Image (cartoon, rainbow, N blue to C red):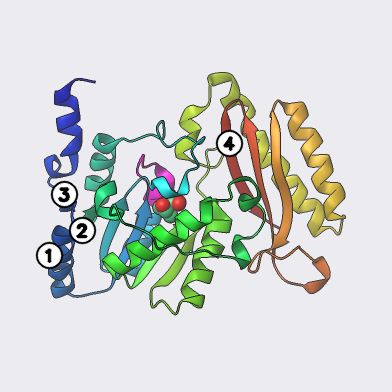
Amino acid sequence: MSPNTVQIRNCAFEAEGLAVARTRVELDRAMARLREAGGRVALVPTMGALHEGHLALISKAQEIAERTVVSIYVNPQQFAAHEDLDTYPREELSDAKALKVAGIDLVWAPSNETMYGADFATWVLPEGAAKGLESDFRPHFFQGVATVVLKLFNQVSPDVAVFGEKDYQQLCVIRQLVRDLDLITEIAGVPTVREPDGLALSSRNNYLSTAERVIAPRFNGVLCEVAQALAEGHESEAMSKKAKKELLAAGFEKIDYIEARDAETLAPFDIDSGRPGRVLAAVWLGGTRLIDNVAI
Ligand code: PAF
């Protein structure tokens, strides 16, 4: 990449004529202007590399609030040292174009230095909904997410914040964060946007090879079969074992977990409780880790 490309990328939002804040002072000024204009403010927190799934979050934000702020920040604190922080897609040029078309009011694009001062030393350590599932494989993850989301809420003070059901456990953890710490931001969840073949949209789908992309939709297909079997009263452990076998046979390398949980508390699913359930799973296809979930 030439120095010119970097330069253009670093001011892509400005080049599209979008209002953008990159420092706390700029954010405070921009938020004061938005607040003065009146109406509810919605925040859509993202890590960029925007796709139709993010655009669905933005549409929801625009439906339920008069002003929409989109944050774009690849949060290093939610990646472990061996994970894909360095290769995670950063696409400011195409993000800027998508946000321009979406007609949002402000982009909040802080630097690492702005988010985490050199002496940063305070963390949110969620338990409850954060226990198990993702945490068994990414123990650092929800601490990083809860900390950055609380910071974003304090920075922007949104009336409502919008998150996707694609990261279902994350959504439960954020709802719990809001309840437990008496935050005043409402949380809105948005159903997962999928490709026509069922694959959940994700920035990490970009990592899949052509051959892997052909296999990938089987992930959602198998989860739907498990959810259907559980709804019919089949036993959850047996169903998850069968699903693991099917996925391995389809070409997935490794299954981190496939589990049925209570849709709100994420406690183990009990069909007799009459409460809604959710099948949640994480699998590896080549070097790519995919997550997905479906309602029971
Ligand atoms: O879901 C994501 O993109 C991230 O985890 C979030 C919520 C923006 C926090 O960095």
Q: Is mark 2 within 8 Å of ligand 1?
A: no
Looking at the image, which is closer to me, 133 or 194? 133
Answer whether residue 51 is magenta in the image.
Answer: yes
Q: Quadrant of residue 29?
A: bottom left
Q: Amino acid at mark 1?
A: Arg
Q: Amino acid at mark 2?
A: Asp
Local crowd size for mark 1, using a 10 Å CA cut-off: few (<14), some (14–19), many (≥20): few
- Give whichever of discs 1 and 2 has the lower sequence position: 1
**Identity of the residue drawn at 81% across and 66% down:** 271
Quarter in which the C terminus is drawn: bottom right
SS at mark 2 in the image:
loop
Alpha carbon separation for disc pair 1 and 2 = 13 Å
Alpha carbon separation for disc pair 4 and 1 = 39 Å
Q: Which residue is mark 2?
A: 105
- Give whichever of discs 2 and 4 has the lower sequence position: 2
SS at mark 4 in the image:
strand
SS at mark 1 in the image:
helix
Alpha carbon separation for disc pair 3 and 2 = 8 Å
Local crowd size for mark 4, using a 10 Å CA cut-off: few (<14), some (14–19), many (≥20): some
Q: Position of residue 42 (x, y in %)?
A: 32, 66
- Camera-nearest label, 2 or 4: 4
- Camera-nearest label, 3 or 4: 4
Q: Position of residue 117 (x, y in %)?
A: 28, 54
Q: Which residue is mark 1?
A: 29
Which span is picked out in magenta? 47-55
The tag on residue 289 is 4
Q: Which residue is mark 3?
A: 18
